[in-house]
Amino acid sequence: MNIGWACQTYVHPMSQNIDPKILKTFTKINFSKDKCNTQYKLSVIVLILLSCAWSCKSIHAIADAPNEDTVFYRFRANLDKIDNYMWESSLELFKKKKHLWKRRKIYLSIDETHDPYTGKFRKIIDWIFGYTQKRGETGNFKFLVFALTSYTQRLVVRVVPLKIGQDITPIIIETSKKVIEHTKIRAVLCDRGFYKSELVKCFLEENIPFIIRAKIPPKIKKCYDFKKTVVGEIYDFQNIQVNLVRHRDGYSRKYGFLTNLPEEIWQKIPLWYKQRWDIENVFLACDKIQLKTNSTKIERRYFCMVFSLLIYNLRSNESKQKPLLSFCVNLINTIIASIKKSFDVLKPPNLNLPGFIFIL
């Protein structure tokens, strides 16, 4: 109703026979008294009113100087849209560099990463886990990350926010099958956090090659020897028959791996599993560029996490990799230059508003 009234008040008289000079003068009126360099034309006022109605926000919240409220309300994507964008952009990068990936043996590494929360802990929020790492943290948001790794080549293909008590097995199987549709992988690599019978059973049923580092309880230590030579046998893992491969490194550290790979490959499994550490290097790099927010809204947290991983993907798939800081500076300069070029073509009014408003 308010928008209709505004359009009738301002737009309708213009449809009459008004002197063009008067109309031109009216549309150049500066409605801002305290900011003389800001001009709000009639079309922009109507656009602001439409934007307020669309986002269910007050005019002050929309038309005021850019802040986190206006920026995030212009970013109206939900979790599915962010997930799809991450997958599609990663797949596009993979296709552009497919000639490089073809020469390599590819693994799909899976791990969880945590985004610290330092606000008041609220049990009613399904996304905040009680897990803490550093002093001052009251909880953490958890994300499941999938990355293609191949020695020096890395590409994050998917990130999924996790709820408390959520079953991650369907997500892992679904993503593994999607990746296999586009490229051949040697194995899916998981650490001891994924040592679960349900996941092993699904891998076996779907015939997806996998290596999961096994927990070594006293039962395994008592029944099996760990030698420098890789050995293995069929193991009864909670009524599931799977290969258990054992190994002891030069520091006498004992390792066990659950896998469905054939016996002739068992000797290579400890070396192959080391490729999983590449995803840890991804997390280490992204910690330096991740957007910081203390919001409890999972959409904002998810966006910040995906944003940092997308920048990492862009940098890691360059032919000549630059230092991360240098790459970010060049990226920002490129974006600003692109915006300036677009503005020169479109010639929008000089506004104290987010650039996103012109898309609405």
Image (cartoon, rainbow, N blue to C red):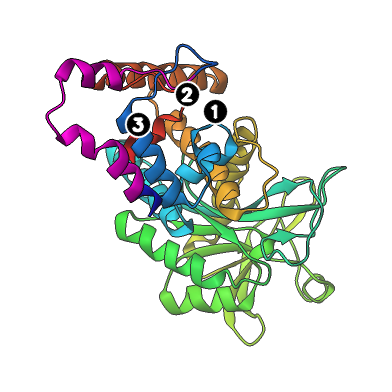
Work out which residue is located at the far bottom of the displayed protein and give it. 239
The residue that disc 3 covers is 44
Q: Quadrant of the C terminus?
A: top left
293 shown above or below 44: below
Depth check, mark 1 against mark 3: the one in front is: 3
The residue type indicated by label 1 comes to Ala
Q: How far apart in space, not on screen, are marks 1 and 3 (Cα)?
A: 15 Å
The residue that disc 1 covers is 65
| Magenta span of residues | 4-32
Q: Earlier in the sequence, mark 1 or mark 3?
A: 3
Q: Earlier in the sequence, mark 2 or mark 1?
A: 1
Picture disc at residue 218: none
Query: Residue 38's image quarter?
Result: top left
Q: Position of residue 231 (x, y in %)?
A: 63, 65
Between 198 and 270, the one nearer to me in the picture:
198
Between 71 and 16, the one nearer to me in the picture:
16
Residue at x-position 50% and y-position 67%: 171
Q: Mark 2 and mark 1 in contact? Answer it, CB < 8 Å.
A: yes
The residue that disc 2 covers is 352
Q: Is residue 24 magenta?
A: yes
